[in-house]
């Protein structure tokens, strides 16, 4: 969404010379986009939690990744980035994309769906706690992924706003996940975070090992698979930039695990 569209949609935009600066709640369009390809499958078909997923690539023996957006329904960057990934052509490997994990929460533009916070339903070593969580988990397990990436949004700035993690990448305590997160964070801070936004520098979050009932914790603990929680802040960062950075981070993480897209043609 460009600046004028953001204004038209009612998003509060601060008049400033710096591009990409927005404060306030997102009030634009929050409905799932019409995807550019047909669905590979559906979770919880014929229920109000019904949500589709998509497979990209799959023509070779390369690794498979899973991308999840919309676990929290008000984290627009996550599902918009997952939608952007549906446009990719893969050069190597394949991908399962679940753009709208908690579609009821997305429709309500709220963090939680009718069963509460979806990302608190995945205890390590146990059955996931809801039907939706079980369906999502079964899809992940059936995919036998090399990597799982869960796309989220934070609000404040790391170490400035106590409650928020800022811009961070949380790796599982498996394999090379920590090293990949460290390399990526360094690259992001060198390449894309403007010098004027030094508080927006990315950090590496703690390693996720199963002590909290979250999807990526469970991916690491139960499957021994590399996983990452990606957190972009909405603090002084407009949605378009959040989506671009979230998509870039997903591409880099997938690339580190051998899943590569054909270079973007834009
Ligand atoms: Zn979240």
Image (cartoon, rainbow, N blue to C red):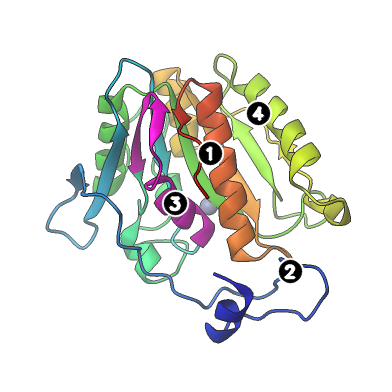
Earlier in the chain: of badge 4 and badge 1, it is 4
Q: How far apart are labels 2 and 3 at the CA level?
A: 22 Å
Q: Residue 61: give x, y in percent of width and height.
A: 31, 15
Q: Residues within 10 Å of mark 3 (few under 14, many from 20)?
A: some
Residue at 46% from the left image edge and 57% from the top image edge: 80
Q: Please report the residue visible at 58 percent of the width from the left and 77 percent of the height from the top.
A: 6
At a point 54% along the width and 69% down the height, the residue shown is 1
- Decide whether residue 9 is among the magenta residues: no
Q: Which structural element holds mark 4?
A: helix
Instruction: Please name the residue that numbered disc 1 is placed on.
Output: 250
Kindly identify which residue carries mark 3: 84
Mark sitting earlier along the chain (3/1): 3
> What span is in magenta?
75-97
Q: Nearer the viewer, mark 2 or mark 3?
A: 3
Q: Is residue 68 above or below residue 110?
A: above
Q: Neighbour class for label 1 at 10 Å: few (<14), some, many (≥20)?
A: many
- Mark 4 — residue? 181
Q: Measured from the top left, where is residue 146 in percent x and y?
A: 42, 21
Helix, strand or loop under label 1? helix
Looking at the image, tell me whether mark 3 or mark 4 is earlier in sequence order: 3
Q: Quadrant of residue 175?
A: top right
Judging depth in this view, the residue of 57 and 185 nearest the camera is: 57
Give the residue at x 59% y 40%: 249
- Residue nearest the observer in this picture, 203 or 19: 19
Residue, disc 2: 21
Neighbour tally class for label 2: few under 14, some 14-19, many 20 plus, Cα within 10 Å: some
């Amino acid at each position: 969404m460009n600046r004028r569209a953001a204004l038209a949609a009612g998003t509060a935009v601060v008049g400033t010379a710096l591009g990409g600066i927005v404060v306030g709640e997102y009030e634009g369009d929050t409905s799932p986009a019409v995807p550019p390809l047909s669905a590979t499958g559906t979770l919880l078909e014929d229920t109000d939690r019904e949500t589709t997923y998509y497979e990209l690539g799959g023509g070779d023996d390369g690794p498979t990744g899973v991308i999840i957006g919309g676990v929290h329904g008000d984290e627009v960057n996550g599902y918009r980035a997952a939608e952007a990934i549906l446009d990719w052509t893969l050069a190597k490997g394949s991908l399962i994309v679940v753009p709208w994990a908690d579609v009821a929460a997305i429709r309500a533009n709220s963090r939680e769906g009718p069963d509460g916070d979806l990302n608190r339903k995945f205890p390590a070593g146990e059955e996931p706690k809801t039907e939706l969580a079980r369906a999502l988990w079964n899809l992940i397990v059936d995919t036998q992924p090399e990597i799982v990436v869960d796309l989220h949004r934070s609000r404040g700035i790391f170490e400035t706003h106590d409650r928020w993690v800022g811009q961070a990448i949380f790796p599982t305590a498996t394999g090379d996940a920590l090293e990949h997160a460290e390399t990526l964070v360094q690259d992001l801070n060198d390449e894309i975070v403007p010098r004027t936004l030094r508080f927006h520098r990315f950090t590496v979050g703690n390693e996720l090992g199963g002590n909290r009932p979250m999807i990526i914790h469970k991916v690491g603990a139960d499957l021994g698979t590399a996983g990452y929680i990606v957190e972009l802040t909405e603090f002084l960062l407009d949605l378009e930039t959040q989506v671009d950075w979230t998509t870039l981070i997903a591409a880099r993480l997938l690339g580190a695990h051998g899943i590569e897209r054909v270079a973007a043609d834009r």
